[in-house]
Amino acid sequence: MILCRAVAVVPMAKPSFIRAEQPYAPDLAADRTVVRGGATSRRRDIVFVVNPRGANGRTGKEWKKLLPYLRSRLGSDCNICESLTSGPCHAIDITREAIREGADAVIAVGGDGTLHEIVNGFFWGGKPVSNNDQAVHTTALGLIPLGTGSDFARTFGWKNDPRDAIDRIAKGMRSYVDVGVISGKREEPHYFINVADIHLSAKAGYYASRYKKFGNLCYVIGALQAFFGHHNQDLRIKVDDGDWEVYSQVTALCIGNAKYFGGGMKISPNAHPSSQNFEVVILQDFKWYDFLFKMHKLYNGTHLSVRNVSSRSACSIEVEEIVSSGNIFVQSDGEYLGFLPKKFSVLPGAIEMIC
Ligand SMILES: Nc1ncnc2c1ncn2[C@@H]1O[C@H](COP(=O)(O)OP(=O)(O)OP(=O)(O)O)[C@@H](O)[C@H]1O
């Protein structure tokens, strides 16, 4: 059972769950049970992990406005626990604690960065986090997309309407989704759910994160900044533990578990988080004017027929530089993750998601 308690919020502190609503039947809340049609069932704990700084502060404001609707849709069946993040990575700790305490679901309220941290919170030491009491119980992942890009939600066609998301959570339909795991030399595994990408797009994402106050324009500014001093690079890749293959003059290499990145670019149009594999899309020898003339194709997902663009499906892919420079950027779900070399592998159906 989750203890919903008000605790001072400290960066990287032990997670805090703050009860966002008083249950409608306080006498029942004591033992967290409700009686439905003669059958007794436990009230479900749903933990909402809110990034108040998401979308340049819009997430926090929207969340406050949403609470009455949330209570009206979920308050009779669930304990609604809210936990505001205090800084980067806090959502990881909150999620691990919530799963260990047996939460029915952890809901990301924010953008892809918040979702990414919560997905990472589903794992610890290379293994899934499990419930303390060992009961057969799975914590589901949910999403109220309220970020700048909110690209993961686009694959499912979810509108940017938080009330729709709450309705989805209230219905509670679940399905298993794949997660990507990234390993590097002497690094803890790192997880992603949307798109991992390498080189120009990753560098653009790195710069874009500095300009989130400009909304979706941040991706354009980030891309322009990344272009300065950019050089396409020869890389070698190994797909599904096969032989090493050389790809010359790579501009960007994108590993899609889902379809969209960069604020609406349909980069891996054939990817889906329930497909049990990635779609790997490689752009080679692109010049700045190629982007100018082909950008619309990247946005609508018709770029796979363009010269110098290739696509293949893969369950795992290793990527290295041929001549090591140590400065080829990698990002996952729009978050900076360091540099090559890295290996990316799919974990089929690793998380149950409210869809
Ligand atoms: N309290 C906080 N203060 C500052 N930064 C935070 C806080 N909580 C989380 N973060 C960081 O904010 C970053 C961005 O958050 P989020 O993804 O929710 O919004 P966004 O960047 O606007 O949306 P998107 O990623 O969809 O473009 C995350 O990387 C997260 O680490």
Image (cartoon, grey):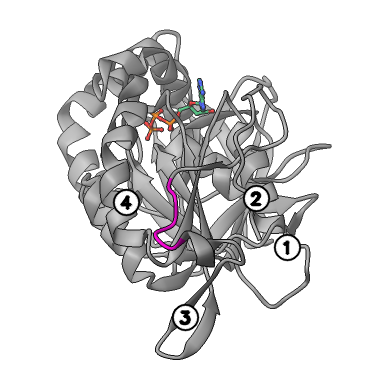
Q: Nearer the viewer's eye, disc 4 or disc 3?
A: 3
Mark 2 secondary-structure assignment:
loop
Label 3 environment density (alpha carbons within 10 Å; few <14, some 14–19, many ≥20): few
**Disc 3 within 8 angstroms of ligand 1 (CB):** no
The residue positioned 28% from the left and 56% from the top of the image is 72
Q: Nearer the viewer's eye, disc 3 or disc 2?
A: 3
Q: What amino acid type is highlighted by mark number 2?
A: Leu
Which residue is denoted by mark 4 in the rendering? 70
Q: Is residue 48 left or right of residue 267?
A: right
Label 2 environment density (alpha carbons within 10 Å; few <14, some 14–19, many ≥20): some
Q: What amino acid type is highlighted by mark number 4?
A: Leu
Which residue is denoted by mark 2 in the rendering? 3
Q: What amino acid type is highlighted by mark number 1?
A: Ser
Mark 1 secondary-structure assignment:
loop
Q: Is residue 348 magenta?
A: no
| Circle nearer the N terminus (4, 2) | 2
Tag 4 near tag 3, CB within 8 Å: no
Which residue is denoted by mark 1 in the rendering? 130
The residue positioned 77% from the left and 53% from the top of the image is 126
